[in-house]
Image: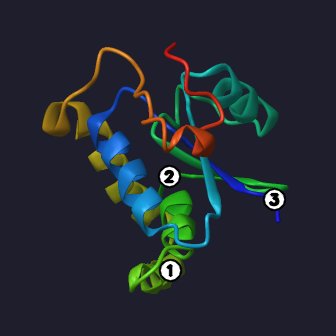
Amino acid sequence: MTKKIILFDGVCNLCNGAITFIIQRDKKDIFRYAPLQSEIGKELAEKHHIDLNKVDSIILVTEDKAYAKSTAALRIAKQLSAGWPLLVVFLILPRFLRDGVYDFIARNRYKWFGKKEACMIPTPELKSKFLDYEQQ
């Protein structure tokens, strides 16, 4: 099985917290991770025609497609343990509504949760889950 890749804002405290949350609930080991600021993050965004000036928080890349914003978050939740897959029901809402809420949080994430000076470096135990863990 090919792993699904989650691209995330490596300097955002909220995004880093979300990645830790996902890792803890990814019981089937479905995901791999890369900061948007990394070379592989930039390459995957370009390959899937994602403008990083418009999408700068979480992107889910599967074998043949990339999902951004609320669609990415809900598709990620669908793969997690416990009750998180139930959130997929929100995909029935129009994307402009879901993304409106998502964009509001994304616009304020640094103000509310803070920002790191550099991308996170995973612990030695987690390095194998990250495609590019070098600081950018």
Q: Is residue 25 left or right of residue 27?
A: left
Q: Could you tell me the amino acid type at mark 3?
A: Thr
Going 37% across and 16% down the picture, which residue do you hit?
A: 118
Q: Is residue 17 left or right of residue 92?
A: left
Going 36% across and 26% down the picture, which residue do you hit?
A: 11
Going 49% across and 43% down the picture, which residue do you hit?
A: 125
| Mark toward the start of the polypeptide (2 vs 1) | 2
Q: What is the x, y in percent for residue 15? A: 37, 43
Report which residue position mark 2 lands on.
69
Q: What is the x, y in percent for residue 54? A: 52, 33
Quadrant of residue 122 in the image? top left
- Up-down relation of residue 16 to residue 83 (above or below): above
Spatial CA distance of label 1 from label 3 is 22 Å
Spatial CA distance of label 2 from label 3 is 22 Å
Going 54% across and 22% down the picture, which residue do you hit?
A: 37
Q: What is the x, y in percent for residue 128? A: 62, 42
Report which residue position mark 3 lands on.
2
- Up-down relation of residue 133 to residue 26 (above or below): above
Q: What is the x, y in percent for residue 84? A: 41, 79
Quadrant of residue 134 in the image? top right
| Mark toward the start of the polypeptide (1 vs 3) | 3
Crowd rating for badge 3 (residues with CA inside 10 Å; few <14, some 14–19, many 20+): few
Q: Contact (CB < 8 A) between labels 1 and 3?
A: no
Q: Secondary structure at mark 1?
A: helix
Quadrant of residue 46 in the image? top right
Q: Which numbered disc covers residue 88?
A: 1
- Up-down relation of residue 20 to residue 134 (above or below): below
